Image: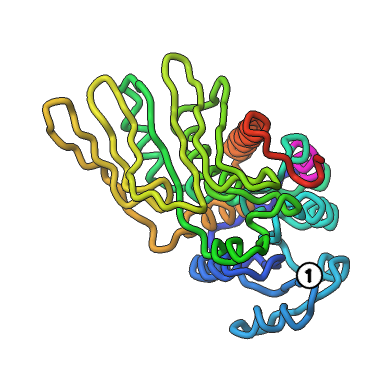
C-alpha cells in the first residue's frame, strides 16, 4: 500500500460522506464530530427529501440522490450504513473514486466480497475498515492481557436484544433487518459482535456451527453457535426476537471472568474458585463508537500497516465464520437462491 502522508492528530479534519440515513449514521456522526477528527460534508440517499431530512440538524452539508455525483464530490472517507446487501457494490464504487471506506458491520455477505474489497482498496491506495465497534474497544485489550497467563476452558458470549422492528414483522411486513433480499438476521446484525470478541480474545476458531429459529425466507430470528478452539469451545447466542440479560463469561482453570456485556463494556470481574474477586481496570468510553472512530482516524492519518493488516486478517476470519455458520443453519440470502 502506498504510504499516506502522516501528521499529528488534529492537524486536519477528515471530510466525511455518509450513505445510509438510519439512526446508526447519526450515532456515528455524533462520535465522529466529538472526536474532532471528522467533519460531515456530504450525504447520499436515493431520495433527496430523505437526505434533506437526515441532514437538517447539520450545517454546510451537500446532499445527493445520485451515487456517481456523490462520489465525485470532495470528501476523504465515506461511512456506509445502507442495507447489508448493498455494502459490496457501494464500497467498490467508493474505493474506485479514491475514498477511504468505513463499512458498518457486517461489511459484506460473502467472504470473497471482502477479499475483493481489500484488493480494490490496495489498488487505489485507500483504507477499508469494518465498523465492528467492540473490536476496537480498549477494554478488550485489557481483557486479553489479563488472560495471557490463564488457561481458557471455554466461554459464553451473547448479544440478544428484542428488535424495534419486531412489531412490523409480526404485522406481516418484512423489515430490512429480517429480509433475505437485504441480508438480514440476528447472526449478521448482532451475532457478529460476540464473534468479533471471540476472534479478538482467542484468535482464529477451527470451525463453527449455528442452529437457529428461522422465518420462511430462512432468515434467523435467534440462534446458538459453537466456535471450536483447540481444547475448548465458545458458545455464542444471538437474537432479535428475544432479549438476553445474561452477562458474558470466560472460563479458566483459575476461575471465571464475567463481562457485563459484549460491547461498550463497563465492567470485567474475575472470580476465582475461592470466591475472591479481581476487578479489571475497565474505563467505559463516553460513546459506543468513540474508540472505533479514533482508531480509523489514527490509521488514516498515521498509518500502522502491520496493525491494519491484523484488522483485515481478523475481519477476513470473521466473515469466513459467518458464512460457515449460515451454511450450517441453511440461511440463504436472495442473491444466493
Q: Nearer the viewer, residue 46 or 136?
A: 46
Q: Which residue is found at the position 30% from the left and 24% from the top?
A: 252
Residue 317: x, y in percent? 62, 31
Image location (x, y in percent) of residue 116:
80, 39
In what quadrant of the picture does the N terminus appear? top right
- Residue found 49% across the figure and 44% down from its top: 238
Q: Is residue 305 left or right of residue 100?
A: left
Query: What residue sits right under mark 1 in the picture?
Result: 74
Image position, residue 320 (x, y; %): 66, 31
The crowding category of the residue bearing disc 1, from other C-alpha atoms within 10 Å (few below 14, some 14 to 19, many at least 20), is some
Residue 77 visible within the image: no
Secondary structure at badge 1 equals loop
Q: Residue furthest top?
A: 231
Q: Which residues are magenta?
A: 115-122
Q: How is the image coloured?
A: rainbow
Q: Is residue 140 visible?
A: yes
The residue drawn where x is 61% and y is 49% is 185
Amino acid at each position: 500500500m502506498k504510504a499516506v502522508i502522516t501528521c499529528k492528530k488534529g492537524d486536519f479534519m477528515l471530510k466525511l460522506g455518509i450513505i445510509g440515513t438510519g439512526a446508526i449514521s447519526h450515532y456515528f456522526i455524533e462520535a465522529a464530530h466529538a472526536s474532532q477528527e471528522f467533519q460531515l460534508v456530504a450525504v447520499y440517499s436515493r431520495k433527496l427529501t430523505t437526505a434533506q431530512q437526515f441532514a437538517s440538524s447539520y450545517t454546510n452539508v451537500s446532499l445527493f440522490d445520485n451515487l456517481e455525483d456523490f462520489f465525485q464530490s470532495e470528501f476523504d472517507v465515506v461511512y456506509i450504513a445502507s442495507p447489508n446487501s448493498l455494502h459490496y457494490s457501494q464500497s467498490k464504487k467508493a474505493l474506485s473514486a479514491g475514498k477511504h471506506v468505513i463499512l458498518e458491520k457486517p461489511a459484506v455477505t460473502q467472504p470473497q466480497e471482502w477479499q475483493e474489497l481489500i484488493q480494490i482498496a490496495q489498488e487505489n491506495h485507500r483504507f477499508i475498515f469494518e465498523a465492528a465497534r467492540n473490536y476496537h474497544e480498549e477494554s478488550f485489550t485489557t481483557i486479553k492481557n489479563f488472560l495471557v497467563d490463564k488457561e481458557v476452558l471455554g466461554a459464553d458470549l451473547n448479544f440478544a436484544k428484542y428488535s424495534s422492528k419486531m412489531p412490523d414483522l409480526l404485522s406481516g411486513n418484512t423489515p430490512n433487518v429480517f429480509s433475505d433480499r437485504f441480508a438480514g438476521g440476528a447472526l449478521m446484525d448482532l451475532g457478529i459482535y460476540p464473534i468479533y470478541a471471540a476472534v479478538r480474545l482467542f484468535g482464529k476458531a477451527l470451525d463453527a456451527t449455528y442452529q437457529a429459529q428461522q422465518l420462511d425466507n430462512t432468515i434467523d430470528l435467534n440462534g446458538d453457535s459453537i466456535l471450536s478452539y483447540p481444547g475448548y469451545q465458545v458458545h455464542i447466542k444471538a437474537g432479535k426476537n428475544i432479549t438476553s440479560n445474561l452477562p458474558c463469561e470466560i472460563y479458566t482453570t483459575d476461575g471465571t471472568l464475567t463481562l457485563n456485556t459484549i460491547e461498550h463494556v463497563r465492567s470485567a470481574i474475575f472470580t476465582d474458585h475461592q470466591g475472591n474477586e479481581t476487578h479489571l481496570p475497565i474505563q467505559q468510553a463516553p460513546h459506543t463508537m468513540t474508540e472505533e472512530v479514533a482508531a480509523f482516524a489514527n490509521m488514516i492519518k498515521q498509518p500502522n500497516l502491520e496493525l491494519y493488516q491484523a484488522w483485515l486478517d481478523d475481519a477476513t476470519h470473521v466473515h469466513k465464520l459467518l458464512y460457515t455458520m449460515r451454511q450450517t443453519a441453511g440461511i440463504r440470502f436472495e442473491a444466493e437462491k
